[in-house]
Image (spheres, coloured by chain):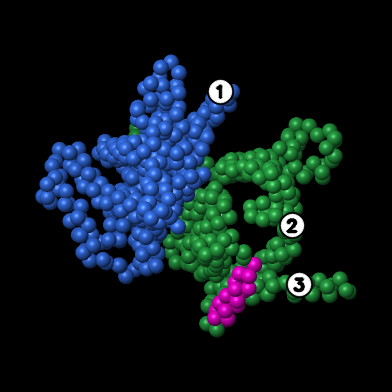
Amino acid sequence: MDVILNFIGSVLGMTGTYAVLFGGLGTYLLLPHRHGAIRPRAAHGAGLIAVALGLLIYMTYWRPPGLLLPAVFLYVFGATSVIGAVLTITSRDPVASALWFASVVLSTAGLFLLAEAPFLAAGTIIVYAGAVIVTFLFVIMLAQMEGKADYDRAARSPGWATLTSFIILWCLLASIATLKTGEKVGTGIHHLARNRLEPEKQLLRSRDLEAYIGSPDANMTGVVRRAVSPMSLVADARLAEGEAADNPEATSVLVHRPNVAGIAASMYTDHLASVAIAGALLFVALVGAVAITNPRMPVRPSSSDPAQRAAVGSVRP
Amino acid sequence: MLVLIGIVIKMLVVVGVTQGAVAYLILVERKVAAYAQDRIGPNRCGPFALIQPLADGAKMLLKEDVIPGYVNKPLYLLAPLIAIVTATIGFAVVPFGPVGVSAPGVSLPFGMGDYKVDFQIAPAIDIGIVYVFAVGSLAVYAVILAGWASNNKYSFIGGLRSSAQLISYEIPLGLSILPTVLLAGSLDLNAIINYQDALGESLPFGLGSLGFLGWGVFTCPIGFLIFLTSAFAETNRLPFDLPESEQELIGGFHTEYSAMKFGMFFLGEYLHVITVSFLTVVLFFGGWDLPGLSQEQVGWIPALLKTGVLVGKVALMIVFMMWIRWTLPRFRYDQLMDLAWKALIPLALVNLVAMMVFLQATRS
């Protein structure tokens, strides 16, 4: 009983709970009603106010990476991405939804830039805004030639959808709030490096698999052995940085690595297993997509194939 | 603060020069078209029709700006803005001359110290070329939104054609530059120029004295051809101007646009032509590199010389693109798609793998 009470107490004590509550309520009120009917204006107003309130509370979680300009950019990109996400699911016009999604992707790319991840930002724009959403738009525009269909304008089960997605959001917020940020040692960049390193240590990486699969002496051969070998350069550079904080004479350990090289090094050492699995899945999906494609008879039969010509009925003698 | 002011000045210069260049590119295009068809072309406004661009600009601004009643107004207004913004911000990472070590410096008055003038708005960006592609991939929104918001069947077909074409040709465009990037070992455009310069001078058997054999066009000729073909498609120019094709679609996606909004689409298209020409020169023609110029030369005179060489190469490239327009007929739509998916993409993949094998084999 005490456990449950404690849990409820800690849930109510977290600021994020109220952000999620207000945001979820507002989103539910703003979602298009079933059968494409329009909700009363009062419900829309209440929804807007609740979403705004939730966003304001959520903003207390944001930590700007610097003063003035970075802070302004953080709040602008963050707010536009959240507002764009709400508008994506509450718009009644599918084309507008797709465009709001594009604005979410662009704001997210801006946040990546603020986090010093330019390659991720550019990659996100190329893949999502440049390819995926354009394909969405393409299909929506082709399918929407005659007016908008009812099923496109209404959310199917807004209540359940809002509930589940906001529970996931709450879990994320709770995990961020309880993440240990490490003891504060040193000053300046070493202090930052130490603080960034600590939460990262809590993430599961391929090299940690070694501990789960078996002891280092276990008979692992081939791919598994390579996948879990601790040879990441990025993390090691960071480790060296962290150690430099304790040893003031060794401050020249700081190594600048190009962004792309750093990501590649991390992907093919720390996360090799995940990359290989994702690649295999995508390959299977590719083969499947080719397999289920319906091969169609060509409109104009090739003149060299008499059987095909007879089947279609050639005009020429 | 000093850096910020420098960047703002560079931005103003680049935007001003490129937009001014666009006005004169339209004149060049008309003159090239005229000579290709054995005509004289515009010759009434000033000597060699040099005031013609001003007259054209004034005409664009002063014409009646019609917004048809049946359009989706917000998207209709947004489309030309996207066209011009995406075409302009791509210039941020394109080098116009020497950057980094060989950049000249100025000593400022009032004891404000020295300032190094990099001929690039945002120097030392790791992802250089990827940024250009990211911005370029957003340009398709202008066309697809213009086609859809116009609420007109011809515009709509133009928009659909364009989105399919741009998505298809982005893939060979991206794949074709990878061998060059692998060779240079960097995505930064300036590092790629420096690599070509250094490679050209270090070739054995006396080839180094020629100085220009390190250019991408000699080291990755197949990549260059694929890049050039895809670049024509990405800029919607003949023989790939299916989104506009006047004979079938009136004007394609910009049928319903008039006055300056129509002009903004044109401005965006020509800015794209300039960007693509810059990329071609930087990736495959050694940027500012000519026999006799190298990255060790520091100072204002070599810097201005290099900038002149780079801009001259870009101008030649632009004239080449205009020349092609009057040489090749337009593709049929299925031929266009076949070319991208069945020819260019497999070829680009084979080219990439071949370069990887070569690099792996020759790695000491």
- SS state under label 2: loop
Q: Position of residue A211 (x, y in %)?
A: 82, 43
Q: Amino acid at mark 1?
A: Thr
| Badge number at residue A182 | 2
What residue is rendered at 53% in x and 78% in y?
A38
What residue is drawn where x is 85% and y is 35%? A217
Colour chain B appears in: blue
Which chain is rendered green in the image?
A: A
Q: Residue furthest top?
A: B205
Where does the N terminus of chain B fall, quadrant-wise? bottom left
Local packing at callout 1 (Cα closer than 10 Å; few below 14, some 14-19, many 20+) is few
Front in this rendered view, residue A281 or B52: B52
Residue under numbered circle 1: B362
Q: Are marks 2 and 1 on the same chain?
A: no
Work out which quarter of the rendered image holds the C terminus of chain B and state it. Answer: top right
For the residues bearing labels 2 and 1, Cβ distance under 8 angstroms: no
Q: Main secondary structure of the magenta part?
A: helix
- The percent coordinates of residue B311 (x first, y second) are 31, 40
Q: CA distance from mark 3 to mark 1?
A: 61 Å
- Chain name for mark 2: A
Quadrant position of residue A2: bottom right
Residue at coordinates 41% horizontally, 48% vertically from top-left? B115
- Image height check: is B205 above or below A170? above
Left or right, A226 with respect to B224, comes to right
Q: State the residue position of label 3.
A: A11
Q: Is residue B325 magenta?
A: no
